[in-house]
Amino acid sequence: MTFPITDRTPIRFPGPPPADADVVVIGGGVIGVMTAWFLRDQGLRVTLCEKGRIAGEQSSRNWGWVRQQGRDPAELPIMVESMRIWQRLAQEIGPGLGFRQTGVLYLADSVAQMARYEGWLPHARANGVDTRALSAAQVAALLPQAARTWTGGLWTASDARAEPWVAVPTLAQAAARRGVTLVESCAVRALDIAAGRVAGVVTEQGRIRAGRVVVAAGAWSRLFLGAHGVRLPQLSVLATVAATAALPSVFDGAATDSAFAFRRRADGGYTLAPSDHHDFFPGRDALASLRAFWPVVQQDWRHTVLHPFAPKGFPDAWSTPRRWSPDAATPFERCRILNPAPNGRIIQRLRDDFALRFPALGRPPLTAAWAGMIDTLPDVVPVVDHVAAIPGLTVATGMSGHGFGIGPGMGRVVAALVTGTDPGHDLSRFRLARFSDGTRLRPGPSL
Ligand SMILES: Cc1cc2nc3c(=O)[nH]c(=O)nc-3n(C[C@H](O)[C@H](O)[C@H](O)COP(=O)(O)OP(=O)(O)OC[C@H]3O[C@@H](n4cnc5c(N)ncnc54)[C@H](O)[C@@H]3O)c2cc1C
């Protein structure tokens, strides 16, 4: 069982990169690709550098949920816009994205959980989202083949799914046709800084002059920024996912209860994941950020299993250097694609979890299993901001486990930020300075 995008996947955009650009984007995940897309729409010359393969990390390893439901109130208006952009992209690009509005369903195991779900409804109403609270009988009507019952549910029929293995690579190809220059296997080693501001980047394939740079480096952003003295309290957890072979339909959308999440894929299989388990490999960064993460640790410790050492090459491995010379290979080239081993015990559990809920189908055969490192910030919302200390530098990272769905909308917002036009949304919750100016960090809703 292998995961489709690895460092053996053929390079589609070999470069070399140009010597000049208006903007360089670091990172070819959904945030980088969509930021580049919207910058190009404004007529700018954009070069995107990806150290491995487009969408090789989180952006192809995720569950494929495109959800408004349960979002932090500050993210929700951007997500509503993102849904409109997904709709437009699906019309323009066709079925390749696998985008379908088949709904997202949260299943409540208790009255207390149902009350938390209902507590989110005012945010839906304020943003015109069609979320509804469901009774146990209404849930049973949506899942007629389920062998168990739930107290109730939260249901957003307009929420969607898309196919992560193909969606972002397909968007990247469309971006290239629109004039974005993409270069894979091209790690950015460092910023080129002159007279105190961004003058470009130093890549493993040479220097690119550019007055503006966007860091959309996912789980590597802390390492990259830290080398330039920019502090970002970002950590990552390992999440295991499995794909079943095609099965008779039990539900066409995406659903989760407090232990198990599943989503119907375009190929008729289901993508399965635990909703109550992450593996965590603390390194130096984790120790340094323990205090900042304490509120989330208190909320989530039951679901997080600690392992003593991060595997070699991980951004927060003890052996990963925090400083390097731009003249030699850096940690970014040494780990082209963060492709951690999935948790074998969880993979087996997922088959049991599926069979428990849908016994008529039994333990499903799996066609793939993989893991991804989810990058997160202490308040579980991203940083989308300029770096005041380094004019010309913008950061868009820390999507905290829900950046796939919001990616297109976030790309539009980041592009506006870079060009100094009105982003159209209040971005104050996403300020970088919140980690240093005494702001009390509030984690987003935990439903
Ligand atoms: C298992 C799992 C399930 C998830 N489920 C969902 C879901 O259902 N719905 C949802 O909305 N979100 C989900 N997410 C979260 C979502 O996938 C991420 O938030 C989103 O993909 C982040 O996009 P990104 O572009 O910020 O980062 P990434 O996709 O990680 O991309 C960052 C890229 O930057 C590159 N890079 C790093 N450093 C450098 C450098 N120095 N030079 C060049 N390139 C560099 C990396 O190689 C990487 O490709 C899930 C994530 C995981 C792992």
Image (tube, grey):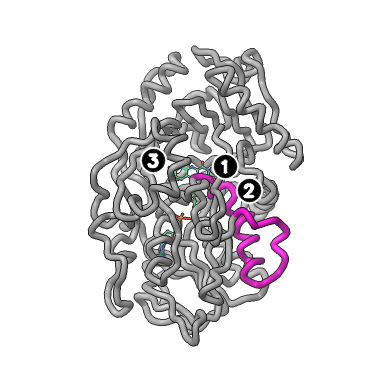
Q: Secondary structure at mark 3?
A: strand
Residue type, mark 1 in image: Gly
Q: Nearer the viewer, residue 251 or 303?
A: 303
Residue type, mark 3 in image: Ala
At x 41%, y 70%, the residue is 229
Q: How many marks?
A: 3
Horizontally, residue 388 falls left or right of residue 27, namely: right
First in residue order: circle 3 vs circle 1: 3
Q: Are marks 1 and 2 in contact (CB under 8 Å)?
A: yes
Q: Secondary structure at mark 1?
A: loop
Q: Nearer the viewer, residue 145 or 413?
A: 413
Residue 253 numbered tag: none
Residue type, mark 2 in image: Glu
Q: Nearer the viewer, residue 343 or 3?
A: 343
Callout in the foreground (1, 2): 1
In the orientation shown, which residue stands out farthest toward the front? Answer: 438
Callout in the foreground (2, 3): 2
Residue 75 numbered tag: 2
Residue 196 inside the magenta-drawn segment: no
Label 3: how many Cα within 10 Å (few below 14, some 14–19, many 20+): many
Does residue 179 sit above or below 170 in this rendering?
Answer: below
According to the picture, the residue beneath numbered tag 1 turns out to be 444
At x 30%, y 69%, the residue is 330
Callout in the foreground (3, 1): 1
Horizontally, residue 255 falls left or right of residue 294, namely: right
Residue 239 numbered tag: 3
